[in-house]
Amino acid sequence: RFPAEDMCRFADLIAHMAALGVRIANMSMGSSNREDWRCFEDAAARNPQILFVVSAGNDGRDIDRQPVYPAALPLENMIVVSSSDSFGRRGRGSNVGAMAVDVMVPGERVDVIDHRGARAETGGTSYAAPRVAALAARFLTAHPGARTEEIIDFILSRAIGAPGVPLAHGWIPDPTDDFGF
């Protein structure tokens, strides 16, 4: 069975990831029903060694006021990511939140190959979150003993102001930069 059919399967999946030594998980999914995410929240909290990089969603709303889960969950081992264009402007429809959304990274006008095999452009928070997960993975590769808190601190230290966009920490203009590590 797929997790969407039984959301408590996330507890099993997280336990499996922990047993394998997974340190970073990207999650580009969500719903408006917190109860859907109760098992995920409990399992994630029991596994602080795993960093969950979660997309903020693309409903065009402030998730501090109208939550989307798992992005709005108060987990210490989670970073919530919104999408911007290359100039730091909020992506069309990208969710924000001064408390719930940590950072925004460029995730708009991404070149992809679509379902027909044709080149296309797309974007959104589901394209921004993996860029932060990749930044976390590069940091962890350079610092294999880093704790989850240290990975999060590194990522958040890269954020700069994003005027007019409600975010907890700010905008990371280029998450592909290795920052000298």
Image (cartoon, rainbow, N blue to C red):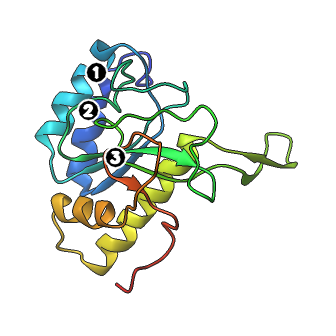
Whichever of labels 3 and 1 marks the residue nearer the N terminus, that label is: 1
- Numbered disc 3: secondary structure: loop
The answer to the question of whether label 2 and label 1 lie on touching residues, with beta carbons closer than 8 A, is yes
Kind of residue indicated by mark 1: Cys
Specify the label residue 102 is tagged with: 3
Query: Which amino acid, mark 2?
Result: Asp
Tell me the residue that label 1 is attached to. Answer: 8
**Mark 2 to mark 1: distance in Å?**
8 Å
Residue 10 locus on image (x, y percent) = 31, 30
Counting from the top left corner in percent of width and height, residue 160 is at 39, 62
In this rendering, would 114 be left or right of 10?
A: right
Q: Which mark is residue 66?
A: none
Please identify the residue farthest to the left as the structure is shown. Answer: 46
Q: Quadrant of the N terminus?
A: top left
Q: Residue at x 56, y 55 (%)?
A: 88
Marks 3, 2: nearer the viewer? 3
Q: Residue at x 43, y 15 (%)?
A: 5
Which residue is more in the foreground, 55 or 170? 170
Cα distance between the residues tagged 3 and 1: 26 Å
The residue tagged 2 is 12
